């Protein structure tokens, strides 16, 4: 699937319309994901009606404001408009995380022919291995909403890393993660040992002082006793 866009430039639908044109960037944003190719036109009434539905679908699966772990999903808009201004009208309505091909890129029509798109709106859903999961998922998205992604995920046998963490936890080398905890634990125990040591040292010092004081008292009493005895003699 990544091969579809390796030699192409994908543009992010953000304010700056950042371009992804390196192999690393393309692979990073598409690999191991279910890919949706959205073919549409600004002049199509059905497309205008479908846009809010698609936006809501995409936001609830990708936007951190709606979901804790964004799904392994990528959406690329393929414009079939007759002018760049028309394409821009559609882009203004689409989510900012959507990707698209520049209007001047002839690859748009190649993709239309490759996937035999004859009507719009069309959403071609592609598995990570490049095989077609659905030639047009518009009706499924309208009918089932985000629930249809679960079916796509099962069909594509796509396993998300966040779900695998618990299964792999015992096999992971967690030394780096637990070291700070261990250091804190050992530091606390060391502090306790030091405290006991200092207390014992202080206590020993007090005891030695007490012994010296006792010895001094005994010596004084002995001397005083000797003086008294001498007088009596």
Image: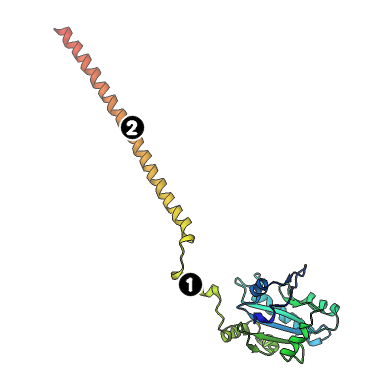
| Residue under the image location 17 percent in, 9 percent down | 230
In the shown orientation, is residue 211 left or right of residue 90?
Answer: left
- Image quarter hosting the N terminus: bottom right
- The answer to whether residue 196 is left or right of residue 125 is left
231 to 120, vertically: above or below: above
Helix, strand or loop for disc 2: helix
Q: Is disc 1 placed on a helix, strand or loop?
A: helix
Badge number at residue 166: 1
Which residue sits furthest front?
7
Colour pattern of the rendering: rainbow
Crowd around label 2: few <14 · some 14–19 · many ≥20 (10 Å): few
151 over 60 or under it: above or below: below
Q: Spatial distance from mark 1 to mark 2, Cα to Cα?
A: 55 Å
Q: Is residue 186 left or right of residue 126?
A: left
Measuring from the top left, give residue 207's x and y in whole percent.
30, 32
Checking the image for residue 205, the label placed there is: 2
Residue nearest the viewer, comparing 6 with 92: 6
The quadrant in which residue 71 appears is bottom right
**In the image, what residue occupies the spot 54% across and 72% down?**
162
């Amino acid at each position: 699937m990544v091969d579809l866009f390796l030699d192409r430039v994908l543009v992010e639908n953000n304010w700056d319309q950042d371009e992804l044109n390196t192999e690393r960037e393309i692979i990073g944003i598409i690999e191991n994901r279910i890919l949706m190719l959205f073919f549409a036109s600004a002049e199509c009434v059905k497309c205008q009606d479908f846009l809010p539905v698609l936006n809501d679908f995409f936001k609830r699966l990708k936007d951190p404001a709606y979901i804790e772990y964004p799904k392994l999903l990528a959406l690329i808009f393929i414009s079939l408009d007759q002018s760049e201004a028309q394409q821009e009208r559609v882009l203004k309505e689409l989510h900012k995380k959507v990707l698209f091909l520049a209007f001047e890129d002839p690859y748009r029509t190649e993709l239309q022919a490759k996937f035999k798109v004859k009507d719009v709106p069309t959403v071609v859903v592609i598995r990570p291995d490049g095989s077609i999961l659905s030639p047009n998922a518009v009706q499924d998205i309208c009918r089932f909403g985000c629930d249809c992604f679960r079916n796509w995920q099962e069909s594509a046998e796509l396993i998300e890393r966040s779900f695998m963490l618990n299964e792999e936890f015992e096999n992971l080398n967690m030394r780096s993660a637990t070291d700070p905890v261990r250091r804190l634990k050992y530091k606390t125990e060391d502090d306790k040992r030091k405290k006991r040591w200092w207390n014992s040292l202080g206590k020993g010092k007090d005891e030695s002082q007490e012994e010296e004081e006792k010895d001094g008292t005994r010596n004084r009493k002995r001397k005083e006793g000797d003086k008294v005895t001498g007088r009596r003699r």
